[in-house]
Image (cartoon, coloured by chain):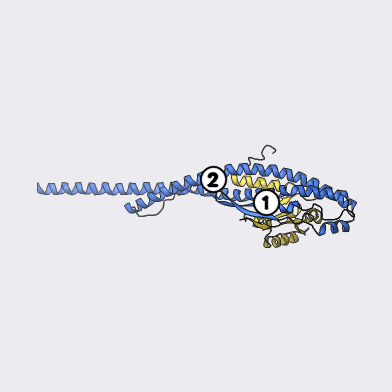
Amino acid sequence: MANAAKMAAVGERDAVLAFKAMGMTVIPAAQADEAAAAVRKLAREGMAVIFITEQAAGLIPDTLARYQNEPVPAIIPIPGSRGSAGLGMQRLKANVEKAIGADILFEKEG
Amino acid sequence: MALIQVNPTRMELTRLKKRLMTARRGHKLLKDKRDEMVRRFITLIQENRRLRTDVERELTAAFSQFALARAVMEPEALEEAVLYPARSVALRLGTRNIMSVQVPVIQVDPDSLKETILPYGLASTSAQLDGAIATMTELLPKLVQLAEIEKTCNLLADEIEKTRRRVNALEYVMIPDLEQTIRGITMKLEENERGALTRLMKVKDMLATREA
């Protein structure tokens, strides 16, 4: 059942260069259309995991939503070179609210 | 409460009773499914949260190391150094079944972690770059794990929402509607029966008076 698969990274040039060193497919993208095109292209190529920096992910919520409920690719926002803006955590929170109806995970921190 | 429009006959009544039984059983099953999915989801999401906090912290650290490396080296030299990766990361992709939700299982192929860590020679690069790359490499399995678990949570959350809608539709619409309709038909049938009985008694009375 195990297939070989690959990873990729999309985001600002500075951040994704580090992923390049690890042998991932990397597409630098700074603008919304570039990022959306990159994600679509990588998804078509059958990437299992696409890491996308939060800056880039914030530009293309629609494209991300399209792949949200497909088993692959898993599109994972990561903090970019400018640090985390909390987008990834927001997605977690949205998941909890969707599944349970109330935020039971993060309420402590407000 | 909108009643289902049916003829008040015994056949309809039996049919509706069967539907009600099926609806009740479906409701119970779906409710159990939802409860179990929520239980699993909570464990997963806690793990997810812990992992994401870790990864975000470590990745930010790695990036700042990388930024240092960039500051020390020529941009062209840096890009040249990482441009041709000596290793490629292979993933093993499978699927797992959580409460009949197909979720991905993503693992780093262990072979691809064995190879040499640095994709470049040491002469023209800075020590910071070595450090940054080493940190990133260590982080890789965690990143992949995060990807797996986050996707799982995503899919599970979606399925839980769907199941919850179904449970609620059954509980608050289907089942009450069916019950009401069944009650309506039962009452209508009883009324007919009483009507028939009264008619018979009346006829009997009329016959009795005529004979007398």
Tell me the element at label 1. strand
Residue at 13% x, 47% y is: B208
Task: Measure how far apart labels 2 and 1 are at the Cα level.
Answer: 28 Å
Q: Is the residue marked by circle 1 packed among few (<14), some (14-19), or many (20+) residues within 10 Å? A: many
Query: Which residue is farthest left?
Result: B212
| B25, B109: nearer the viewer | B109
Q: What residue is disc 1 on?
A: B107
Callout count? 2
Tell me the element at label 2. helix
> Which quadrant of the view contains residue A49?
bottom right
Image coordinates of residue B110 in percent, x first then y, are 70, 51
Residue B34 numbered tag: 2
Q: Is residue A83 visible?
A: no
Image coordinates of residue B10 in percent, x first then y, are 32, 52
Q: Colour of chain A?
A: yellow
Closer to the camera: disc 2 or disc 1?
Answer: 1
Q: Are marks 2 and 1 in contact (CB under 8 Å)?
A: no
Asked if A96 appears above or below A4 in the picture, the reply is above
Q: Colour of chain B?
A: blue
Chain letter of mark 2 equals B
Q: Is residue A42 visible?
A: yes
| B98, B24: nearer the viewer | B98
Q: Are marks 2 and 1 on the same chain?
A: yes
Chain letter of mark 1 equals B
Name which residue type carries label 1.
Answer: Gln
Name which residue type carries label 2.
Answer: Arg
Image coordinates of residue B85 in percent, x first then y, are 79, 57
Q: Earlier in the sequence, mark 2 or mark 1?
A: 2
Image coordinates of residue A40 in percent, x first then y, are 69, 61
